Amino acid sequence: MEENIIEQTVPVTEIEQAIEAILYAAGYPVEYAKLSEVLGLGVKDVRDLVENMAEHYNGENSKHGISLLVFPETCQLATKEAYAPYIRNALGIRRGGNLSASSLEVLAVVAYNQPVTRAYIDTVRGVDSSYAVGSLLDKGLIESCGRLEAPGRPMLYATTDKFLRVFGINSLSELPETEALSTAAQVQESSQSESAEEQDADVQTEQSTEE
């Protein structure tokens, strides 16, 4: 029976120290695939190690001022929110950067229904959302993730790892349930279905007329 790849290379503690050093130096989310490449381990092995380390950093009895954020494809070291006032005072950072009500609305629509087009967002909100979408793109909270296979091939948008980090969650499954957005999505899907049926009926009518 083959030994675990981690046991065949360097001690686990040294690997954890290397991961800690890399994440500290990076200051941004690092992909497990990149850590895997650098450390010579399997991606799953790296993720398992990171999750074990996260328990040490994030546990109730942790004495660290930083936490280890674990995302689906990346991980990152970050300061704990409880120490934000000390950090702001020490570094002279002013409060600010809060999202506007319209940006929060757009972000909620994207988060709960992604991937979505801007037209979909506009339909759910009932107003033009181009400025809010642009603002969220600039802030790195949403990103383009391809194009919809439909006439005009409109851009699709989804939330980013930064969105998870800013809102203090590890995955979209941790988002609180909201009936309002679910209802809005159902209404939109129903509307699109009815529109498609109407188009099919028009095509059949035209074909019948030609015959």
Image (cartoon, grey):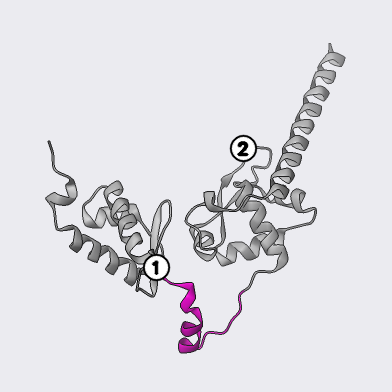
Is residue 60 at all visible to an observer of this figure?
yes
* Above-or-below relation of 124 to 141: above
Above or below for 50 versus 211: below
Label annotation for residue 107:
none
Identify the residue at image location x=14%, y=50%: 7
Q: Is residue 119 visible?
A: no
Where's the N terminus, which quadrant? top left
Q: How many marks?
A: 2
Element under label 2? loop
- Image vertical order of residue 211 relative to residue 197, above or below: above
- Mark number, residue 149: 2
Upstream in sequence: badge 1 or badge 2: 1
User: Would residue 203 be found to the left or right of residue 76 on screen?
Assistant: right
Whether residue 48 is in magenta: the answer is: no
* Residue 25 coordinates in the image, percent (x, y): 32, 71
Q: Which residue is mark 1?
A: 67
Q: Residues within 10 Å of mark 1 (few under 14, many from 20)?
A: many
Which one is in front, 177 or 9? 177
Q: Position of residue 177 (x, y in %)?
A: 63, 49
Tell me what residue is drawn at x 26 percent, y 53 percent.
37
Amino acid type shown at disc 1: Ser
Q: Position of residue 152 (x, y in %)?
A: 68, 42
Which x, y percent locates residue 98? Answer: 63, 73
Which span of residues is magenta-colored?
A: 78-97
**Is residue 3 left or right of 128 when viewed as pictured?**
left
Q: Quadrant of residue 50?
A: bottom left
Q: Residue at 61% of width from left, 63% of height from top?
A: 136
Residue at the right extreme? 209
Vertical arrangement, residue 177 with respect to residue 86, above or below: above
Residue 139, quarter of picture:
bottom right
